[in-house]
Amino acid sequence: DLSNNKLFWKIPKSFGKLLKMRGIFLSNNKLHGPIPSQLLHSDMEQLKQIFFHGNLLSGTVPIGLADLPNLKNLFIDDNKFTGTMPPEICKLNLNEAFFQAEEVPVRGGDTDYDDKILWDDDDVFDDDDEWDDDDEFDDDDLYDDDVMDVTDDYSSENPGLLYDDVYQTEVYNKIEHDANVIAEIGQVENEQYEEEAVIMSELKKVEELEVDEETAIIEEMQDLQQQQLATTSKEEYDALQAQIKGLEEDLNEVEVVRGKEEAGLEADYEEVDMTRDQQVEQLEGELNDRMLHERKTKDDLDFEGTIRNGCNSVACPAGFRSTKEGKDGVFPCLQCAHDLVNPYLGSSRCYEVNQRLILSHFYYATQGKDWLGDHKSWDTVDIPVCEWEGVRCNANNDIVSIALSNSNLKGTISEDLGFLRHLGALDLSNNQLIGNLPSELHYVPLEKLDISGNMLTGFVPPFMCEKSGLNGNGDDGKFSCSQVACSVGTHSSTGHASSVEECSACRSNEYSYLGDKSCVAYQSVEATRKSDSGAGIVSAIFVASIVISCVLGVMILRMRSIKKGGYSMGVRASDFVSLRLGRGDGNAAYHNSNLAPAAKNQSSNPFSSGTFAMSSMEVKAQDQWNTGKDSSSEVWLDVPRIT
């Protein structure tokens, strides 16, 4: 059982030669790449258990797993597999004993669950050599640098599933469709408001014109009436009265004409209001119908998720997540909400696609409150995400660039960043980020990535290695992981290879992290430790001298008290044996006093706790840092060389 270790690399192809192997327990490590096809053949008659869950394996689930004649247990959840589960594997009804257990068992070799339930009584090992004499163990099987080897029979027939599955695209399309419908509703409402505003403006003008015309007529009528009061001639009075009647007719005509105009404008207003309301109702109905259909579909799928079958017994499908603690990534499964996405098989979570939530998760995952610089907007609710410091958006308010170099970021890079669909540039250089480079970043259209000056470990995810245009990758027709970021133990002036510069290996007394621009000498760590040790020795001697002085003072006082009491006592040299200061004892005391702090510091270090993958170069670097001693041991599978 090699589960829960720091195993880093790919699954050896040479495992396919171990014909009498009954189980492979490699769960909860940092293995990456595909499941090798060399492992999947009918000659592996005794192989009954495969535990690969909790790694970084990618590609599609190989159909060749169905060729293992006696396979009983297969756990591949919590990896980066995409696509669908091959029907041939679903028909095998694997993991029956796991689901029939009354209590959720521990998967792997941590308990005797496997031995009691799954091993047949007649399964015994023999010492017969299962290797042909002409078979030679090939080191390349263990240390194969061809990270592009991700094809098998099933993935060859479904090449599109290597990068993205139908579900993920469908989810994004649904989200974009809903957003478009909502935007169209908003546009209709805005047009309604604008049209109604124009009508109301015209109506106001008509009313004002009517008032002006009526006012002018009334004033003229009042003037004529004043003239009537002043005249003494009946003929002149009658003439003025005739003019007044004419003005009254004009007043009535103005009221009729303007009234018709107002009525027409009011009718136009009502028509616009009714037409736009109908359009909005139609769009809202379309949106509600789609969501209702999706809800019914989701209910059906959720119902199906409550029924265990041969597929979800191995891994929940893409677009679903597991629900029951202790059975992460397998049945029972629940479909992701309509605004979440999950492109992986056997996942226990769904990913955010909301830009604000993604950046908020990243902010808190990297201790945003301790960032250097003015980043208050990242923690302010009412500021649009496109106005956050270091964030740049396009005309559609899609995030296209994030620049947070020299900002004191501490923590890990959020996987959710890989679901910012329009992200083209990501600069996280010169911070204190740890952990691995998320493989989810291969989903976004990155053209520029800078992770230099951090403490990232592990490797460049395989799919990112063949991502065209990323840091110029593929511009010359060749794709390379180093074009994305220099591997651990190498460096370049940009942190990645280019057409004019390759990543150079560090010297034997130097080390570097993933994507570094320079190497760091081990001697600097040694010198610091020696300086600290020298200061510690001086401090220890000083403290010891004080202790000796105190003890001698107590003994002198005791002797005096004895003499006063009538007794006489000599002091023998042997009385000071326990207080002697010798080079050996003094150093031993010093080293012993420093063992506990050293152990405490080492156990609290995330790189030595098994959380992150470490290559042999990283292990050596960490050993140099923690103990000051050189270590050339490799962390990998203990596979014997057969000659």
Image: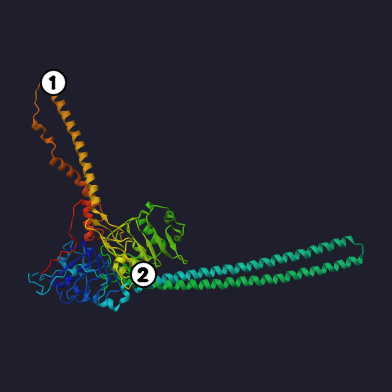
Q: Quadrant of the N terminus?
A: bottom left
Q: Is residue 69 above or below residue 575?
A: below
Quarter of the figure with residue 22: bottom left
The front one of 346 and 476 is 476
Q: Is residue 306 above or below residue 610?
A: below
Q: Amino acid at mark 1?
A: Lys
Residue lying at the far bottom of the rendered structure = 157
**Left or right: 414 in relation to 558:** right
Using a 10 Å C-alpha cutoff, classify the residue at mark 1 as few (fewer than 14 neighbours), some (14 to 19) or many (20 or more).
few
* CB within 8 Å, label 2 to label 1: no
Point out the frontmost of discs 2 and 1: 2
Q: Quadrant of the C terminus?
A: bottom left
x and y percentages locating residue 62 in the rendered image:
24, 74
Mark 2, secondary structure of its residue: loop
Which residue is found at the position 18% from the left and 31% from the top? 549
x and y percentages locating residue 232 in the rendered image:
92, 62
User: Disc 1 designates what residue?
Assistant: 564
User: Is residue 529 visible to us here?
Assistant: yes
Residue lying at the far front of the rendered structure = 500
User: Disc 2 designates what residue?
Assistant: 469
x and y percentages locating residue 302 in the rendered image:
34, 70
